[in-house]
Image (tube, rainbow, N blue to C red):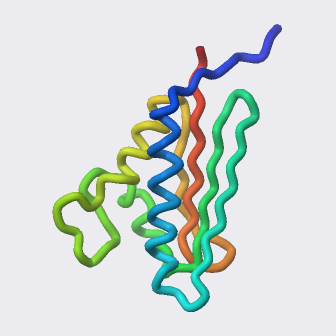
Amino acid sequence: MSTPRYRIEPRDVVTPAGNPVDNALDAASGAEGPRVEVSVLWDGTRFRLLVGDNGPGIPEADHEHVLEHGWSTKADSGVGRGVGLALVSRAARRNGGTVRIGRSPPGGAEVEVTVGAPT
């Protein structure tokens, strides 16, 4: 029995990779000694991204909400806010993946994205 192969379209990796990194850079920019850690794994079947920062983090009660379209942790939640992580979640799910929100070791937010879809 062969291992199932996964086909991932480039556009389905760009948003899941770019948005969490952009968010982490933004969050950490207000911290003393800003720090963002990014880990990427591609094992031939799955893409996995882990992004952590030392910004203010996301309260646990809001972990699911940040994946909703139009919901944002930012105070200036005007037009164009609350879209990125919703798109990340949609792209991951469309390709058999997941998004997990948590707390990073330095105390800020941690976002783990996996993407992979059977061919």
Q: Which residue lies furthest to the bottom in this view?
A: 32
Compared with 109, 87 (above or below) is: above
- Image x and y of residue 34, in percent: 58, 82
Can residue 117 be seen at all in this image of the molecule?
A: yes
Compared with 32, 104 (above or below) is: above
Where the N terminus falls, by quadrant?
top right
Which one is nearer the viewer's eye here, 12 or 91?
Answer: 12
Q: Residue furthest left?
A: 79
- In the picture, residue 42 is in which quadrant? top right
- In the picture, residue 75 is in which quadrant? bottom left
Q: Residue at x 59, y 21 (%)?
A: 7
- Image x and y of residue 68, in percent: 32, 52
Compared with 90, 113 (above or below) is: below
Where the C terminus falls, by quadrant?
top right
Is residue 3 shown left or right of residue 66?
right
Compared with 107, 77 (above or below) is: above
Is residue 102 shown left or right of residue 78?
right
Q: Which residue is drawn at 72% across and 44% down?
A: 41
Q: Residue at x 63, y 56 (%)?
A: 50
Which one is nearer the viewer's eye here, 31 or 118?
Answer: 31
- Image x and y of residue 103, in percent: 59, 70
Which one is nearer the viewer's eye here, 24 or 112?
Answer: 24
Q: Residue at x 42, y 69 (%)?
A: 61
Can residue 59 be seen at all in this image of the molecule?
A: no
Q: Residue furthest top?
A: 1
- Give the mark count: 0
- Image x and y of residue 52, in percent: 61, 67
